Amino acid sequence: MAMQTSDSQKRATMIDDKVRMYLLPLLFNAAVRAGASIMQVYKNLDDYDISLKDDRTPITVADRLAHRTIREYLGPTRIPILSEEGREMRYEERCNWELYWLVDPLDGTVEFIKGNNEFTVNIALMENNVCIGAVVYVPYFGKMYVAGRNAGAFLKEGVAPDAGASYTYDEIVCGWTRLPLPREGRHDHLRVAVSRSHQTSETHEHIERLRARHPDLEVVEQGSSYKFCMLAEGSVDYYVRTTRTYEWDTAAGELILAEAGGTTRSLPGDAELRYNEADLHNPWFVCRSKYCEL
C-alpha cells in the first residue's frame, strides 16, 4: 500500500524545493554582493562616515551601502524586508507578514571599525516568523554558511566578494561541506565563545560558574554572527550572550546552528527565540554546539 502524504508534509516539501532551487541563489547572491559593497569601503576608505543610531550603536557608510545592495537585489521578489537599517517600520505594518527577509547587512560594525575582519552579512528568509532559509557570509575570509530548514547546514569556502555575483544553485552546492565539520568534534576542554566587544559582568559571572565545573575552560572572543558559525562548525562548544541583540542578529545564525545539530535558548527561561515581535530585541541567550555536553 502506498504511504499517504499529509497536506503539511506536501507543504513542507514544496517549501524545501523553493528554498533549494529558487530562493537559495537569491540569499547567496545578495550576501555576496553586499559583501562586495562592504569590502570596497573596508579596503579603500580611511573615513567610514561613522554616526550613532538611536540606541547609540555605530553605523557606517558600509552598513548603508550593503543595505542598499541587498534591497535592490531582493526587491524584485516583492517579499518585504525587515532590516537593521529599516527598523523604524511599525509593528502594525509587519505583524501579519507571512513571508519576509530578515537582514543585517553588516553585523559586527564595531569589529569592522576596529579593522579586525570579524564582520558578516546575515540574511534569513522567514515564513510565519520561522526561519526557513539562511546565509551568513564572512566576506573578508570568503566563507559562506548556508542552511535550509530540515535540509542541513553547509559551508562553502573561497567565495570572494563580487558586486555582480550570479551563482546558480548547482554552483552553490558544488564543493560545499556539511556542518559540523568532520575535523571538529568533542574537544578535550570546553571552548566558550563570547562577544569580543560586548561583554558584561553577567557574562563574566556566567563563565566563572562554568569554570568551577570545567577548570580548563577556554574563552574564545569573536565578533558578529561568526560565533554561530563556529558553533555550527564544532570549533567552539558554547556561546553566552548577556547584552542587547536584535532579531536580525540571530535569525540566520540560529538556523545554521540548529541544522548543524546545535541549540539556541533564552537565558533565563530556556525558551526558543521568537521573531517579528513588537519589540525586536532578543532576550539574553546561550547556544550549544552539537557536541556540547553542558
Image (cartoon, grey):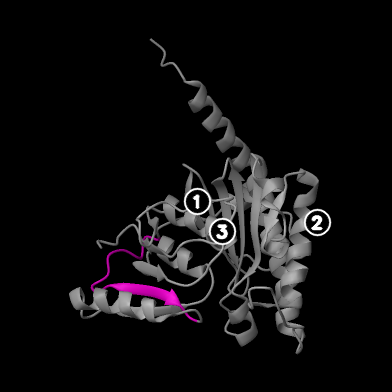
> Which amino acid, mark 2?
Glu
Q: Counting residues from the N terminus, which is met first, the one under dot 3 or under dot 1? A: 3
> Which amino acid, mark 1?
Arg
Which residue matches tag 1? 274
Residue 218 covered by magenta stretch? no
Image point 39% across, 69% down: which residue? 240
Nearer-the-camera pick, 242 or 120? 242
If the image is split into quadrants, where does the N terminus sit?
Answer: top left
Which residue matches tag 2? 72
Q: Is residue 126 left or right of residue 39?
A: left
In which quarter of the view is residue 242 placed? Answer: bottom left
Image point 37% across, 60% down: which residue? 182
Which residues, given as a range, are shown in magenta? 181-196
Residue 81: image x %, image y %? 71, 52
How far apart are labels 2 and 1 at the CA level?
A: 27 Å
Mark whose residue sits in front, 2 or 1: 1
Secondary structure at numbered mark 3: helix
The residue sitting at the top extreme is: 1
Asked whether the residues under the numbered discs 2 and 1 touch, taking CB atoms below 8 Å apart as contact, a structural biologist would say no
The residue sitting at the bottom extreme is: 46
Rendered position, 69 above or below 9? below
Q: Counting residues from the N terminus, which is met first, the one under dot 2 or under dot 3? A: 2
Which residue matches tag 3? 247
